[in-house]
Amino acid sequence: MTEKMMGGAGASRTSYQRYPRVRIREMKDDYLKFELRDTDASMANALRRVMLAEVPTIAIDLVEIEANSSVLNDEFIAHRLGLIPLTSDDAMSMRFSRDCDACDGDGQCEFCSVEFFLSVRCDSDQTLDVTSADLQSTNPRVCPVDVAANALSSAADGYDSAEQKGIIIVKLRRGQELRLRAIARKGIGKDHAKWSPAATVTFMYEPQIHINEDLMETLTLEEKRSWVESSPTKVFGIDPNTQQVVVVDAEAYTYDDEVIKKAEAMGKPGLIEIYPKEDSFIFTVESTGAIKASQLVINAIDILKQKLDAVRLQDEESDMKELTSHLGNL
């Protein structure tokens, strides 16, 4: 009986290995649109959740206020500093401060933290904006995202724009000052949203649309226009030459079923069939700028692979214990 059970267990582990494919549609530093094919919704959603919550970045985690005579209290300023996105190209190679054995958590450690200093005083009657550009980093590779972008822009244009001031932290009037020391550490969005590298990550099933041409031919031009306009988004259009209804942008369809309801109201059920491809997804990724959108996806895939390897290793260890237990009972 034991042999049959083991045989059954082996049969239940039949491999359903698939080989997902990715095709890039549009790529910018902070934006990426790509297709993920030959996989299922569980893998697509796992990738999305890892991008949002488990890809590490660097963010200010500890603030020591030396002097603050501004209108904002210390906690407000510390919170605002934490939400400033920092360039995090080195985050994957850094250590988490809780796992670092080279320091005592004081922030003076090249392996797990980066120090920032800010010292600004207003000595004029004009309101002074304290911005992310005033933060001085001890590591030139880790700085506010907007400062890094402005540096590249200024180098290319040869001048500083009035818009390149940085993210405002607080405003000072005459006699007010702000002096502080901040420590930035590696973290993940699961711990706090300030560490999330993604502004938004969405995916949708790729829609498959089939128009019943025979039924469509029974409609007048006005009925066709009325049917096309029933879609909240511009999915369909009418060819000016043939007067035929055509699919203009299938991906604009939001699975609202409005065109299906309209067809039924017109007495033409079955005029159109729309269903999602269950193994094809369209991803849209927007980065905060901490890392490039393309690197965000690559890092997420690496982390997901590590998680799957850990599950597989645990499964193999469990199988070994089961086999050892079985042999011990013989």
Image (cartoon, grey):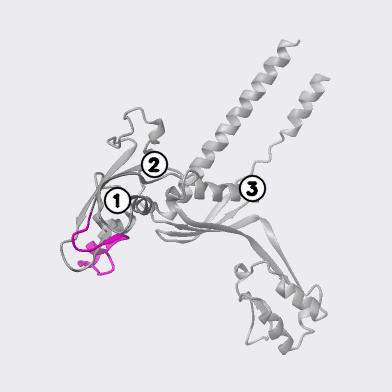
114 vs 38, nearest the viewer: 114
**In the drawing, does residue 135 fall left or right of residue 292?**
left
Please determine whether, in this image, residue 279 is positioned above or below residue 127: above
Q: CA distance from mark 1 to mark 2?
A: 14 Å
Q: Which mark is residue 143?
A: 1
Instruction: Indicate the position of residue 193 as horizontal and vertical percent values.
Output: 46, 50
User: In the image, what residue type sits under mark 3?
Assistant: Ser
User: Sequence-wise, which precedes: disc 1 or disc 2?
Assistant: 1
Contact between marks 3 and 1 (CB within 8 A): the answer is no
Q: Residue at x 16, y 65 (%)?
A: 124
**In the drawing, does residue 146 fall left or right of residue 5?**
left
Q: CA distance from mark 2 to mark 3?
A: 28 Å
Task: Identify the element where label 3 is drawn.
Answer: helix
> Does residue 84 appear in this view?
no
Mark nearer the viewer, 2 or 3: 2
The magenta stretch spans which residues?
152-177
Q: Residue furthest left?
A: 123
User: In the image, what residue type sits under mark 1?
Assistant: Cys
* Residue matched to label 3: 42
Q: CA distance from mark 3 to mark 1?
A: 36 Å
User: In the image, what residue type sits under mark 2?
Assistant: Lys
Instruction: Indicate the position of residue 51 as horizontal and vertical percent values.
Output: 50, 49
User: Sequence-wise, which precedes: disc 2 or disc 3?
Assistant: 3
Residue neighbourhood size for the residue with mark 2, other residues' Cα within 10 Å, grouped as few (<14), some (14–19), many (≥20): many
Instruction: Indicate the position of residue 100 as horizontal and vertical percent values.
Output: 37, 31
Instruction: Indicate the position of residue 3 as horizontal and vertical percent values.
Output: 79, 20
Mark nearer the viewer, 3 or 1: 1
Task: Identify the element where label 2 is drawn.
Answer: strand
Image quarter hosting the C terminus: top right
